[in-house]
Image (cartoon, rainbow, N blue to C red):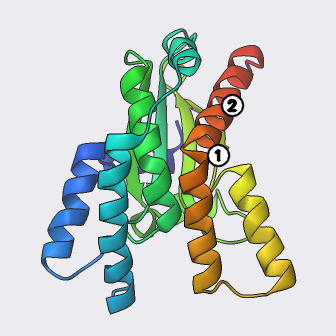
Amino acid sequence: MKSIVAKALFNSHSYAEYRKLVTDLLSEGKSTGNEQSESLTNYSKLNEARMNRLEKTIQIAEPIIDKLQHLDNHYIWLVLSEGWCGDAAQILPILNKMALASNKKVDLRIALRDENDDLMSQYLTNGGRAIPKIIVICKEAGIVRADWGPRPKGATELMAIHKRDVGPINEKIKTDLQLWYLADKGISVQEELLEIMENIKYNRL
């Protein structure tokens, strides 16, 4: 396993640890990450409320649970994230429920983007440090098999249309994106991640 991946794993957090870290920082008026600002702290507060809600409402489809439990190997989903990231807040609770439902076939670990710049630099999206970014690691082989992120295809298309027709990200597209996630109910994330895991199964190195 590459040293930068191993380093990120060593300094990573469980889902519960990540949630506690974000909450503890918010109690000090801070967010995760190198940059600190009132707006980022406010986004972190909003995301915490979103994650609390999603933990109660997100359901993993039974066919997906069955396939996760019958993966041919054990995997780590190493996620680069930050507490202020709206996409991460929508996606992490889904990943956590998928991992819990996998009968220990998937171990979810979360690493902070700004603490792992070397790793983030290897998984850029169109040259940008977009998160969340999921790095799929096969435990048995100790190698990275795939990556995914920062958002599902439908949400990516929504953002692309906005950038083409409007330009820079504004509050309207942020709201539209959250409404997309709300309507999708986590289905796209589940289906796209499962497709990746099945592609790994049938396309072994």
Nearest to the observer: residue 30 or residue 10: 30
Is residue 113 toward the left or the right of residue 2 in the image?
Answer: left
**In the drawing, does residue 48 fall left or right of residue 186?**
left
Q: Is residue 107 visible?
A: no
What residue type is disc 2 on?
Ile
Whether residue 8 is visible: yes
- Residue 49 position, x and y percent, is 30, 63
Which residue carries the number 1 mark? 148
Tell me the element at label 1. strand
The kind of secondary structure element at disc 2 is helix
Q: Quadrant of residue 173?
A: bottom right
Judging by the rendered image, the residue that carries numbered circle 2 is 196
x 62%, y 34%: residue = 193
- Identify the image quadrant of residue 21: bottom left
The three-letter code of the residue at mark 1 reads Trp
Q: Are marks 2 and 1 in contact (CB under 8 Å)?
A: yes
The first of marks 2 and 1 along the sequence is 1
Q: Residue furthest front?
A: 183
Q: Give the Cα distance between marks 2 and 1.
A: 8 Å
- Give the x, y percent position of residue 189: 60, 41
Q: Nearer the viewer, residue 179 or 119?
A: 179
Answer left or right for 110 relative to 160: left
Label at residue 159: none
Which quarter shows the C terminus? Answer: top right
Percent from the top left, x then y, of residue 7?
40, 49
Measured as percent of width and height from the top left, residue 91 is found at: 49, 50
Neighbourhood count class around disc 2 (C-alpha, 10 Å): few under 14, some 14–19, many 20 upward:
some
Seen in the image, is 38 located left or right of residue 133? left
